[in-house]
Image (cartoon, rainbow, N blue to C red):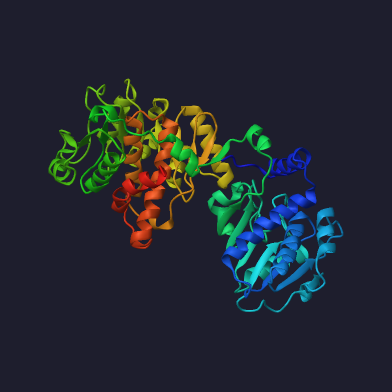
Amino acid sequence: MKILSASQTRSADAYTIAHEPITSLDLMERAAGALVHWLKQKYTAQIPFHIFCGPGNNGGDGLAAARLLHQDGYDVWVYLLEASQNKSSDFTQNLERLPQAIPVVRVQTEEDLPAALPKGSIALDSLFGSGLSRPLEGIYAQAVAFLNRQPAPVISIDIPSGLFADAPTPAQSAVVQAAVTLTFERPKMAFLLPASGAYAGEWHVLPIGLHPTFLEQTDSPYHLLVPQHIKSLLRPRQKFSHKGTFGHALLVGGSYGKMGAITMSGHAALRAGLGLLTVQVPHIGYTILQTALPEAMVLTDDHAHHLTRFPEDLTKYQCVGIGPGLGQAEASQLALERLFQQVTPPLVLDADALNLVATDRLLRQHLPPHSILTPHPKEFERLTGPATDDFHRLQLLKEFCAQYQCYVVLKGAHTCIGTPAGEFYFNTTGNPGMATGGTGDVLTGILTGLRAQGYSALEACQLGVYLHGLAGNLAAQAEGQISLIASDLYKYLGAAFRKASE
């Protein structure tokens, strides 16, 4: 699913109005209908709604929703913020359509706001939409502060008022803290990034029938991973397949006290459908791996506690994953440098492999093209330097992927895949229970297993992050988020494959 900018969204509206054809007022009615349909599925008519409307089209959405909720028997109060005389035409027409039975409070100063909203009510934020380009001031900022003080949950229409859709929102700006955001047709970039996404709460996309031709023909570097796409990538197994059909991978890692990381990574690689797995560990890890991971073959380094070399012959492997539990010994860094200077199978780099690359710029220059790197934000910062904000981090990600012709899986709540072509893919699965040690090692194993089976780097990244998060969701359903641990993820990976293929 393409993610559109605020200007592209306005163009999509205009194109739909011109080519469906449909009036802008009727398109607004369609959006309000989708909004009210969602609200009715969630809340009974015993729940009163207090709707705060700004002077533009977002306020028009709120007025149309107020009318439709009232028609369905809901108690509705409308608050009109009247600091501006520049009201949109669709706002004005929906205000004229508003039934007289709906109480309307005209708010010009802070004193016009109620002392508090009634207990058990819902506040609808319909002040400003995605076209906002400057921080809110005056009565609008005061209304936002009022909404944020209320015990009543706030549901924002399209975007929390005060939040910029596709640029950093200035610090200390007045922004609605929504419990839920109901956005139209496509999510906003702001929802997917840590600082701004926190304001959106739980967000849902409501289709409103924007013209498909415009959506197909409009370019965007930003994409959302959705179930239909993931299902299209999965390859069914053929009857006469054998273990050689599904690739042979090498996982390299582990050090004294960190053998669990490479063990979990190995389990995940096998659960991802890999045919054959070899694991290379320091000598001290031999018994651990043979016991904990009996399906894998084990190579041992000459050194007892850390890696000093890679196998001389890598031609038998379709992918090499490096990093889980590796440590940062100088001998390991020299071994990685020698590896980069020879022809290698596709690489997946994680954890200390990334830290070694970050500390040695010469090593970075030899990074094999089409490698997959899986940093968390702090590891990414070591590679690129600090970002001033989340949008700047995306720019750094774009530049890094282009410079080194690599794929970067920047881990987070909406893990972002950066590509050499300058495209970004945001994940839609996962939960906060996965914020625990070892989940990144599991992801490394999944990516290595998929890449070794012949999936392209981009396909492996898309499938890997989606299935990793989906396994985390299934594990959380069974175990709860608080008690979730990394090994739960590969235990639920089979169920994730089944669900993704449905």
Image quarter (top left, top right, bottom left or bottom right) of the N terminus: top right
Residue 169, position in %: x, y?
65, 52
Quadrant housing residue 125: bottom right
Residue 388 visible to an observer of this rendering: no
Residue 325, position in %: x, y?
27, 44
Image quarter (top left, top right, bottom left or bottom right) of the C terminus: top left
Q: Is residue 298 above or below residue 264?
A: above
Task: Report whether 150 appears left or right of 407.
Answer: right
Residue drawn at (37%, 40%), measured in percent from left and top?
Answer: 355
Residue 128, position in %: x, y?
72, 57
Residue drawn at (32%, 23%), measured in percent from left and top?
Answer: 344
Q: Is residue 502 above or below residue 72?
A: above
Q: Residue furthest right?
A: 85
| Residue nearer the viewer, 314 or 130 | 130
Count of marks overlaid on the render: 0
Residue drawn at (40%, 33%), measured in percent from left and top?
Answer: 372
Quadrant housing residue 202: bottom right
| Residue nearer the viewer, 232 or 287 | 232
Residue 235, position in %: x, y?
38, 33
Residue drawn at (14%, 45%), measured in percent from left and top?
Answer: 291
Residue 359 visible to an observer of this rendering: yes
